[in-house]
């Protein structure tokens, strides 16, 4: 289920933040996007909800974020000839 929140920018215009949170089988997945128009945010939210309803979609969307040390080690290993 998602929510849309109106936010005021520094220049006085309004942006809409779509927040999507799904909990299934002990796994929690959340995603946010910011849009200039509310209908576009609602369309994105409906599309993502349909995509995440497919079997295995949440497990595929949750990525393991490597630590900075692992990223540096991988970079040095792959960039050195």
Image: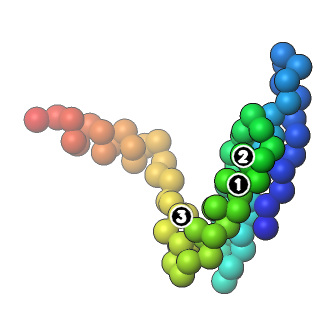
Q: Is residue 17 left or right of residue 76?
A: right
Q: Which mark is residue 43?
A: 1
Which residue is found at the position 30% from the left and 39% from the top? Answer: 75
Q: Residue furthest front?
A: 39
**Rendered image quadrant of residue 28:** bottom right
Q: Is residue 68 left or right of residue 16?
A: left
Please say if 46 is above or below 77: below
Which residue is found at the position 68% from the left and 79% from the top? Answer: 24
Assess whether mark 2 and mark 3 are in contact (beta carbons under 8 angstroms): no
- Label 3 and label 1: CA atoms lie apart by 19 Å
Q: Earlier in the sequence, mark 3 or mark 1?
A: 1
Q: Residue furthest top?
A: 11
The foreground one among 60 and 16 is 16
Is disc 2 surrounded by few (<14), some (14 to 19) or many (20+) residues within 10 Å?
Answer: few
Image coordinates for residue 10, horizontal then vertical, percent: 84, 19
Which residue is found at the position 21% from the left and 35% from the top? Answer: 79
Q: Which mark is residue 61?
A: 3
Is disc 3 surrounded by few (<14), some (14 to 19) or many (20+) residues within 10 Å?
Answer: few
Assess whether mark 2 and mark 1 are in contact (beta carbons under 8 angstroms): yes
Q: Which mark is residue 40?
A: 2
Q: Secondary structure at mark 1?
A: helix
Q: Secondary structure at mark 2?
A: helix
Which residue is found at the position 26% from the left and 37% from the top? Answer: 76
């Amino acid at each position: 289920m998602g929510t849309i929140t109106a936010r005021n920018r520094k220049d006085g215009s309004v942006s809409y933040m779509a927040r999507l949170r799904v909990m299934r089988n002990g796994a929690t997945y959340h995603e946010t996007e910011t849009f200039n128009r509310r209908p576009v945010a609602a369309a994105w939210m409906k599309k993502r909800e349909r995509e995440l309803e497919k079997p295995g979609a949440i497990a595929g969307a949750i990525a393991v974020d490597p630590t900075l040390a692992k990223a540096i080690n991988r970079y040095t290993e792959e960039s050195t000839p």
